[in-house]
Amino acid sequence: MQRQSNSARALSRKGAQALESGFERLLFGARWLLAPIYAGMALALGAIVVVFVRALFDELEHLGTLTGEHAILLALTLIDLSLAGNLLLVVMFAGYESFVSRLHISNHVDRPIWLGTIDFADLKLKVIASIVAISAISLLRSFLLLGDPAAVVYPRRLFWMVVIQLTFVVSGVLLATMDWICPRNRRRDPGS
């Protein structure tokens, strides 16, 4: 009787381990649900390229009549789109490699140096830094319009743009400070 009881418990344990192992494989495989998100980012990057080319060619038609301020606005628009594209690329590559699967391009001559070295904390800071830069360019674009007598300026909108920019900057500083503090605490904590 005792042998049957031990045998039944052993079978029960093996069944529980098999169930747990199967569940863990299912959870681990669920990371692939993120793959379509990263594919969507690649499509969004394509859309940014289309907008970039369209903005460039729209302004090049007026090259002969382009004023200094309009040339600066064009440059800011193109820089803004470039920063958004860079941000998408960093998030797409780093996110895919961190959360889904390694990119098997280690021997590729064009492999970015930073690929595989960005962790979640670095990614977070790159995202907030890009958002601050994109927001600053948008704010600068709005301030340049103040010199154009034909432009309609909304002071309340400018006020909120400055508030939002400052919020982004403060958020970035707080994130960087938290990332700076956390590793120091881990080094001091003998239990970790």
Image: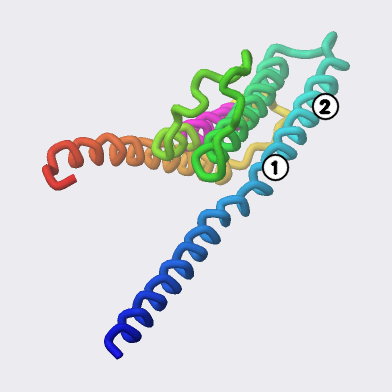
Residue in the picture at 39% in, 42% down: 171
Relative image position of residue 15 (x, y in whole percent):
45, 73
The spot of residue 101 in percent (x, y) is 56, 40
Q: Nearer the viewer, residue 130 or 28?
A: 28
Residue at the top extreme of this rendering:
64
Quarter-of-image position of residue 173? top left
Q: Is residue 29 magenta?
A: no
Helix, strand or loop at label 1? It is helix
Residue lying at 62% horizontally and 18% vertically, measured from the top left:
108
Magenta residues: mostly which secondary structure?
helix
Residue at the image position 84 percent from the left and 23 percent from the top: 58
Give how far across and how far down residue 48 sits, in percent: 73, 32
Q: Is residue 62 above or below residue 157?
A: above
Colouring scheme, one of rainbow, by chain, secondary structure, one colour: rainbow
Q: Magenta stretch: give its range.
A: 128-140
What is the three-letter code of the residue carrying label 2? Arg
Answer yes or no: is residue 98 visible.
yes
Which circle marks residue 85 in the picture? none
Q: Position of residue 49 (x, y in %)?
A: 75, 28
Q: Which mark is residue 39?
A: 1
Direction from residue 153 to residue 25 in the image, left or right: left
Near mark 1 (Cα within 10 A), the count class, few <14, some 14-19 or many ≥20, is few
What's the residue at 29%, 37% (across, down)?
Answer: 177
Q: Which mark is residue 54?
A: 2
Q: Secondary structure at mark 2?
A: helix
